[in-house]
Image (cartoon, grey):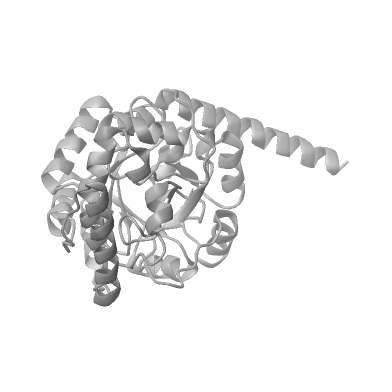
């Protein structure tokens, strides 16, 4: 497996919407980890361009993440109430909104592309791809990983033929990778979830959620993970495409919260005015709400207005450092080794 060939058990989280770049993926891969490109919101053609650029920059392993399109239609009444409220607010502040479009994020073309390109790993978020898609990608030479947030999702992905699972805890920044969003969606902490899945679904696990330091990497490895996946920890790197306003917010002590206000899907970000103002009553309606707020967020990023941007971030965002990605990887690996050595010494002392 790819995980067994990595020099360090560090996986870059795919961060759609800007932070993920070919340069960042290549830097992590070049430092001995697994780089990732986020194809979410990109066309298949743009994904192909980014993959070519990453391959130009490194010979190390770089995977691609794909959003699985949902088939559940939003509850129209709650969506219309939310849109009416948003439009009234936008009209009062002079903000532009888009239309509630439903699309599949160029799903078929991306699967075709990745079946041709044979990247080391294709990971999926927002659901488990059908077994025939998994088999097709594996036949092309790729490993297939599936993001899971609960034991039942892990069992489903294992049964469909996935090679590894990305176990996403509640602490993670950005969208919940759950197979279906719902009002009673469980949001379990990483360590309990990781241990439970490891005990019930015996397959390689990659831990994700709130990991920002070497000791945290060591902790998830001890709890059963084969590697740690980190996203927020890399968002201040010069290679990342994080906007200036988002970078400033990451350095602040502001708390994070879960919201559907920006996209219609549950996600964790740093609290700001838009989140506080619109989270209550925000419907389960992805990607419709995402398309409605996209022009607003784009304009806010260009203007440096952090109060109208989805400031996706994990709970440990204050620990991110503005260092080159290769240095972040090296620090994480060194910190994990040192933490493991301290634990070994402590256990040895206690057994005397």
In this orientation, which residue lies closer to the viewer: 176 or 149? 176
Q: Residue at x 30, y 73 (%)?
A: 78
Q: Is residue 53 above or below residue 199?
A: above
When the figure is inspected, residue 211 is found, relative to residue 334, above or below; the finding is below
Q: Residue at x 38, y 36 (%)?
A: 246
Q: Position of residue 84 (x, y in %)?
A: 24, 65
The answer to whether residue 61 is left or right of residue 44 is right
Query: Height in image: 239 above or below 191?
Result: above
Say how many tags the image has. Answer: 0
Residue 78 makes an appearance in the image? yes
Question: Dividing the image into 4 quarters, which one contains the C terminus?
Answer: top right
Residue at 48% from the left image edge and 53% from the top image edge: 257
- Whether residue 176 sits left or right of residue 264 in the image: it is right
- The reply, left or right, for residue 11 in relation to residue 73 is right
Can I make out residue 137 in this image? no
Is 322 situated above or below 118?
above
Q: Give whichever of 291, 136 is nearer the camera.
A: 291
Q: Position of residue 80 (x, y in %)?
A: 24, 70
Residue furthest right as drawn: 352
Q: Quadrant of residue 146?
A: bottom left
* Residue 297 percent coordinates (x, y): 27, 45
Q: Residue 98: x and y, percent?
A: 17, 54
């Amino acid at each position: 497996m790819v995980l067994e060939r990595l020099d360090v058990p560090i996986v870059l989280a795919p961060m759609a919407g800007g932070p993920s770049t070919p340069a960042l993926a290549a830097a992590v891969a070049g430092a001995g980890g697994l780089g990732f490109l986020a194809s979410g919101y990109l066309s298949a053609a743009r994904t192909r361009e980014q993959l070519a650029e990453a391959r130009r920059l490194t010979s190390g392993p770089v995977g691609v993440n794909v959003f699985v399109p949902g088939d559940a239609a939003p509850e129209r009444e709650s969506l219309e109430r939310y849109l009416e409220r948003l439009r009234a607010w936008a009209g009062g502040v002079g903000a532009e909104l888009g239309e509630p479009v439903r699309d599949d994020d160029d799903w078929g073309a991306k699967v075709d592309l990745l079946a041709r390109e044979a990247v080391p790993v294709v990971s999926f978020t927002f659901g488990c791809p059908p077994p025939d898609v998994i088999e097709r990608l594996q036949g092309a030479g790729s490993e297939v990983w599936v993001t899971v947030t609960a034991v039942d999702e892990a069992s489903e992905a294992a049964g469909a033929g996935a090679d590894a699972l990305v176990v996403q805890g509640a602490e993670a920044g950005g969208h919940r990778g759950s197979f279906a969003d719902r009002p009673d969606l469980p949001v379990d902490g990483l360590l309990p979830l990781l241990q439970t899945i490891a005990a019930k679904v015996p397959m390689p696990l990659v831990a994700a959620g709130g990991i920002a330091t070497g000791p945290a990497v060591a902790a998830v490895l001890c709890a059963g993970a084969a590697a740690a996946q980190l996203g927020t920890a890399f968002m201040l790197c010069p290679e990342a495409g994080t906007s200036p306003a988002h970078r400033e917010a990451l350095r602040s002590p502001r708390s994070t919260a879960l919201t559907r206000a920006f996209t219609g899907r549950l996600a964790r970000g740093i609290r700001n005015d838009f989140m506080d103002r619109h989270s209550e009553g925000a419907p389960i309606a992805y990607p419709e709400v995402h398309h409605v707020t996209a022009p607003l967020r784009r304009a806010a990023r260009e203007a440096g207005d952090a109060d109208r941007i989805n400031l996706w971030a994990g709970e440990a965002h204050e620990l991110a450092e503005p260092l080159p990605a290769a240095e972040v990887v090296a620090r994480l690996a060194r910190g994990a080794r040192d933490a493991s050595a301290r634990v070994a010494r402590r256990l040895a002392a206690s057994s005397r």
